[in-house]
């Protein structure tokens, strides 16, 4: 079994392997067939939490002797165990949902969804009996399951007679003598799992699917504020879009090179560990989780702004408490989102949120429809360049290219990895053209009256305006739970072992949702908060960290010109982060 398939799906809590999975026998270099049939088995890991054999913790397989720096050296077993136990171990499992990898078959969805299996209609009963006939007989599983599922490298080691003894306290479950040729349905005990269950794809992603995944990550709510960027900094600020897009595309390729440097690397935190050790892994993880948390804050602000534009007279006055339309809808939508955050199986929601590209295209079409067909028209205006507010526009444009946290997962899930540079280049070219076109079109339509989201400027009496508003409401509503889940899992993973249960998880997620509401109501400036995110987190994740990690991991083989180029990008990112964050915070304090 190839190393990437072994590690890419090993941290999922369900495993489905179907007849169509023809690439399982091809390794990373297109070589040897699989050494065991561990990929067809399903077992539980012990609660000892040592993580010695968990590939998810650091992205390294337990059977690999490659060191963290990718120099081909050997490591002692205690060092491997210590590195693999590093927090977080749930990163790959949760971030894979954001990349919208290929969906499993309908049978896999039914088997993995406890809520669906509870329905007793004849269709599901017939389907269940049909698939149960094809399942090979296997032993029962323990009802109590740990926070994180086992990796495939663990399962492979359990089946190899000559391998090192397993550190798991549970005895390995006997495996079937022959790998099944059809998808397996998990037992009922699996469906009672307290933690997230997302079925992995039965096959790796093609280049076309990877393009869709990349576009879905890059085409987010940042497109709503590009018009406001021209209003802030002038028309010449649009030159920042291709500049930032080109730098971000290059740093995305640097992440690929970091992953290729060692088979122990497959996620962004793994890159941080390989470059700067355990502190680097923790720092990268914290930055990525803070970015996801801040995105959830933006979702709450966006929902409040959009719904208050549809129902501007809505308010609530009760026992001396007054809530205007924005605050009322922000709180009510957060309460409506809360049950989806409690869900442990987000597979169906992940498929729904994968329609982000469709939602973005719909909003763009509606914008052109209002400008051309409904008589709003285009009115040239605005200044050429406004240096005072240029840092704000820089943060807004930088946020448009914040997808680097997911790029390693997309790369690891690709069937043909050699196509990743083309996929990355195509995605960045498309989104740069789209962002530039929407920014120019929106500002030509609304001029100096352009608001933080161009959908708020669209006349409400027109049908396309209503469609655009509701698409901007549905999109963040479906993505909120997926965006918050990695943050919640990381906190749950850091809890003491006795507190890793369903009740504690619900409390953690509830507190996270309520905290995003408090922050969103305290700083109800959608564009300025986005500019701050773009200035701080995007510059770190997309520009500074990839270059720094690449120079550290490949320090002995990087040519001089590339060293100078990477250092230049680091200084550009640091300058933009400092100036952009200062300007955004200053304007928020001033109440602009």
Image: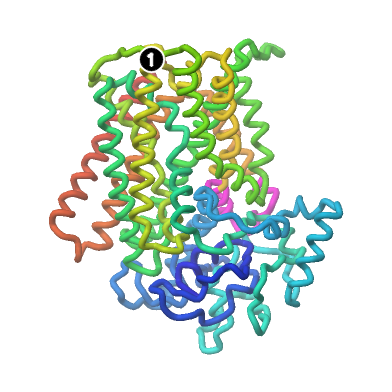
Residue plotted at (86% across, 54% down): 122
Residue plotted at (40% across, 12% down): 449
> 202 left or right of 443?
right
* Residue 423 position (above or below residue 433): below
* Residue 524 position in % (x across, y down): 49, 22
Choose top left, top right, bottom left or bottom right for residue 42: bottom right
Predominant SS of the magenta segment: helix
Q: Nearer the viewer, residue 421 or 396?
A: 421
Choose top left, top right, bottom left or bottom right for residue 45: bottom right
> 500 left or right of 58?
right
Instruction: State the residue position of label 1.
Output: 378
Task: State which region is magenta.
Answer: 486-506
Q: How many labels sit on residues?
A: 1
Q: Is residue 490 visible?
A: no
* Residue 204 position in % (x across, y down): 51, 62
Membership of 485 in magenta stretch: no
């Amino acid at each position: 079994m190839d190393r990437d398939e072994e590690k890419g799906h090993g941290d999922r809590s369900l495993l489905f392997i179907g007849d169509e999975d023809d690439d399982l026998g091809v390794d990373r270099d297109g070589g040897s067939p699989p050494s065991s049939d561990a990929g067809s088995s399903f077992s539980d890991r012990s609660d000892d939490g040592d993580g010695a054999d968990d590939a998810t913790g650091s992205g390294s397989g337990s059977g690999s002797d490659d060191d963290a720096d990718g120099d081909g050296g050997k490591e002692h077993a205690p060092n491997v165990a210590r590195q693999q136990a590093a927090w977080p171990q749930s990163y790959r499992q949760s971030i894979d949902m954001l990349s919208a990898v290929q969906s499993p078959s309908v049978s896999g969805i039914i088997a993995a969804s406890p809520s669906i299996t509870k329905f007793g209609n004849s269709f599901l009963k017939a389907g269940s009996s049909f698939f149960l006939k094809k399942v090979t007989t296997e032993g029962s599983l323990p009802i109590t399951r740990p926070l994180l599922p086992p990796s495939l490298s663990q399962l492979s080691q359990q089946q190899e007679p000559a391998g090192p003894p397993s550190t798991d306290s549970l005895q390995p479950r006997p495996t079937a003598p022959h790998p099944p040729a059809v998808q397996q349905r998990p037992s009922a005990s699996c469906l009672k799992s307290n933690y997230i269950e997302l079925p992995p794809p039965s096959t790796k992603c093609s280049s076309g699917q990877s393009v869709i995944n990349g576009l879905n990550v890059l085409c987010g709510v940042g497109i709503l504020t590009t018009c406001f960027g021209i209003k802030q900094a002038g028309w010449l600020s649009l030159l920042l879009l291709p500049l930032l897009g080109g730098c971000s595309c290059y740093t995305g390729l640097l992440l690929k090179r970091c992953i290729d440097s060692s088979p122990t690397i497959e996620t962004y935190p793994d890159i941080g560990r390989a470059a700067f050790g355990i502190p680097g892994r923790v720092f990268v993880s914290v930055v990525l989780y803070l970015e996801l948390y801040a995105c959830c804050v933006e979702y709450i602000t966006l929902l409040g702004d959009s719904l208050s534009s549809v129902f501007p007279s809505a308010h609530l006055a009760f026992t001396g408490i007054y809530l205007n339309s924005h605050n009322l809808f922000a709180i009510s939508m957060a309460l409506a989102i809360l049950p989806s955050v409690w869900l442990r199986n987000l597979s169906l929601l992940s498929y729904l949120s994968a329609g982000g590209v469709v939602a973005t295209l719909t909003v763009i079409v509606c914008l052109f429809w209002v400008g051309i067909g409904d008589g709003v028209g285009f009115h040239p205006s605005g200044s050429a360049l406004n240096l005072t507010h240029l840092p704000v526009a820089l943060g807004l444009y930088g946020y448009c290219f914040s997808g680097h946290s997911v790029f390693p997962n997309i790369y690891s899930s690709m069937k043909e990895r050699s196509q990743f540079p083309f996929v990355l280049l195509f995605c960045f070219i498309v989104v740069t053209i789209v962002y530039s076109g929407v920014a120019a079109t929106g500002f030509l339509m609304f001029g100096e009256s352009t608001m933080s989201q161009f959908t708020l400027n669209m006349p409400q009496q027109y049908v396309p305006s209503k469609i655009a508003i509701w698409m901007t409401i549905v999109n963040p509503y479906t993505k909120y739970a997926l965006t918050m889940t990695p943050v919640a899992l990381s906190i749950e993973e850091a809890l003491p072992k006795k507190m890793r249960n369903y009740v504690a998880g619900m409390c953690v997620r509830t507190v996270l949702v309520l905290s995003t509401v408090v922050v969103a109501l305290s700083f109800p400036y959608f564009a300025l908060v986005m500019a701050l995110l773009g200035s701080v987190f995007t510059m770190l994740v997309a520009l500074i960290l990839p270059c720094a990690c690449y120079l550290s991991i490949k320090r002995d083989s990087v040519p001089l010109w590339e060293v100078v180029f990477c250092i230049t990008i680091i200084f550009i990112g640091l300058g933009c982060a400092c100036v952009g964050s200062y300007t955004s915070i200053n304007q928020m304090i001033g109440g602009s």
